[in-house]
Structure formats: C-alpha cells, structure tokens
Image (tube, rainbow, N blue to C red):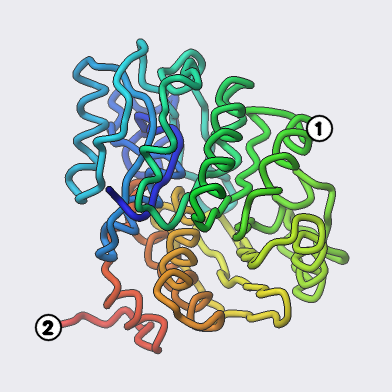
Amino acid sequence: MAKFITFGELMLRLAPKGYLRFLQESEFQATFGGGEANVAVSLANYGLDAAFVSKLPVHNIGQAAVNSLRYFGVDTSMIIRGGNRVGIYYLEKGASQRPSKVIYDRSESSIADAVSSDFNWDIIFKDAEWFHFTGITPALGPNVAQICFEAVLAAKKAGLTVSCDLNYRKNLWTSEKAEQTMSQLMEYVDVCIANEEDAEKVFGIKAENTDVTSGKLNYDGYKEVAHKLTNKFKLKYVAITLRTSISANDNKWSAMLYDGVNYHFSKSYDIHIVDRVGGGDSFGAGIIYGLSQKMSASESIEFAVAASCLKQTIEGDFNYVSVQEVKNLMNGNRTGRVQR
C-alpha cells in the first residue's frame, strides 16, 4: 500500500488560452487538478509512494481524471467509482493589475455526495506513514466533513503523521462554519500549512501590521500567528507562505516554518508567474517531502519554497519538477540560464 495518502476532490479545469478572458474565448483548455491530488502528483514526482483517495464517476470523464494521475505514478486504486459528475472549475488567468478569477461548478459532484461507508480507512492506512488533506475538502458539505473527521481519527490511531493545508475558500463556506469544522479536525493534525490569510479567515488569528491587499507583510507578525496556532492545537510544525503581490504576474515569494522552538525563514524569490494555481499545493508537498525525508527545518522550508517557485512557472495544476531541479534552485542556481 502507498505510504503517503491524500484525500480530496479531483476536478476538471477549463481555462481560456493564455490570458484571454472568459467572455473572449470560445474554446477552453481541459486539464485536471485539485489541492490534494496536486500534492500526490508532486510526491510521486519526487519518487515517493503516493496515493490519492476520492470518489469519481465511472464514465469516461471520470476515467480521464483517474488517468491524469496514473500518468505520474500516483496510486489510484483507492479511488471509489460512483456518483454522477466530476466537479469543474473555470480559471481566467490575470495579468498585470487584473486578478485571476475562479468559478466553481462542483455541487453534487461524486465526492460531494460521498458517504462514510465509501471509505475503509483502516485498509487505506495500512502500512502508510502520512495523511494529507486540505480545508477545501470538508467545505464540500457536512457529509464530507464527517468523512474527513473519520479519516483523521483513523490516521492518528494508525500512528500516521497528519498534515492539513487550511486553504480557506470563501466561495465554499463562511469563516464561522470553517472555524467550527476545522477546529475539530485540527486537534488531530501535526503539520499545519497556511498562506498569509488562512489563519485569520478560519481562526481569527491575524498578523499585526499586515495588509495582504496592498502587499505589506510584517514577518514578525507571522511568528505570532504560528505560535498561537501551535499553542491552540498542539502542532509540531506550522508552515506559512509569504506572498507579496506586486501584480498578477510578478510576486515575491518566501515562507516560514515554525518547529515549536525556532522560526525558519526561507530566502525570497522574485517570480514572473506563468500559472499560480497549485503553487500552495506544491509548497505543501515540499514540506511533506522535506520533513518525511529527515531534512532539517531550514532545509525543508527552502525545499518547499523552491519547489513552489518552480511550479508557478508551469502551466496547469500539477508540478512537473524533480527533486534535483528543486535542489538546484534552493542551492543557488536561480538565473534561469539555458542548460545544455
């Protein structure tokens, strides 16, 4: 059985070509993606034994979704087949001062209609060492939140390390509902992953003297955020990405990892973005890889930030990079010169 298990929704992504707007384009490019699936792909690319757990319909679009993961060597044997539809999200990529836009069409998808009896977590977690989910999955409905709760209970019973990316999505639920649900789940989490806003939107824990809209980030404020999250939920690690958005195309990108004692800040990258969707998932996968491979906290955060920096130069949700490519960047090869 796979050692690294992720659980969530795999969606069909429909996007206009390049930087065209929804209303300009008559043909949309179809690919697949989703938070936890993106993590599984990264881990498989790094040579780890990764599996994705979900529910998808038996028709050809459902099979195409499964095949998109098989291409990377992700174990899909624990995906339940049933239900009527694959969730969809539409992406319009932003440029300069025009932000990207996402429209969801995922109600009544197969995973949104899943029930507890669909998943035998004792079998799924047999011989596994790590379980990862995001705050997007329990936001799909009370039934899926209950499945997540059953999963984290079984994971802790089996002795797995549990990681969660808070991934707050205002289009899926309110801050009040997120706090109520995520507070119960976080009691079983070891590694919390978040961006600049997640802790505030979900738990009301805000970094002082920070305004993400204007691009002003107070790094010392995020130390306090990580400290409060750790104390609240007895976490082993808190990883927070720190994005300064100059425009839709150009960002400064770094992160912090708190290990309960020390705060480890990564180097900062100036990214000219090709596709930022999946950037946070590639960061989470980098944290999982680093910690699971016994890297130090400092090495783990550098690996995760370099991995997600590279992802944001790649079209689509998935991160098509190797461990060596990530290490080349984290060790200083950051000029983008042609390699011959």
Q: Circle 2 — which element?
A: loop
Task: Name the residue located 63 percent from the left edge and 80 percent from the top edge.
Answer: 265
Q: Position of residue 2 (x, y in %)?
A: 30, 50
Closer to the eye: label 2 or 1: 1
In the picture as drawn, the residue positioned furthest to the bottom comes out as: 332
Q: Is residue 299 left or right of residue 197?
A: left
Task: Name the residue located 24 percent from the left edge and 16 percent from the top edge.
Answer: 58
Q: Position of residue 45 (x, y in %)?
A: 26, 60
Could you tell me if residue 181 is visible in this image?
Answer: yes
According to the picture, the residue beneath numbered tag 2 turns out to be 340
Q: Circle 1 — which element?
A: helix
According to the picture, the residue beneath numbered tag 1 turns out to be 176
Considering the image in quadrants, where does the C terminus appear?
A: bottom left
Amino acid at the residue labelled 2: Arg
Q: CA distance from mark 2 to mark 1?
A: 53 Å
Could you tell me if residue 243 is visible in this image?
Answer: no
Task: Name the residue located 49 percent from the left edge and 55 percent from the top edge.
Answer: 160
In the picture as drawn, the residue positioned furthest to the right comes out as: 208
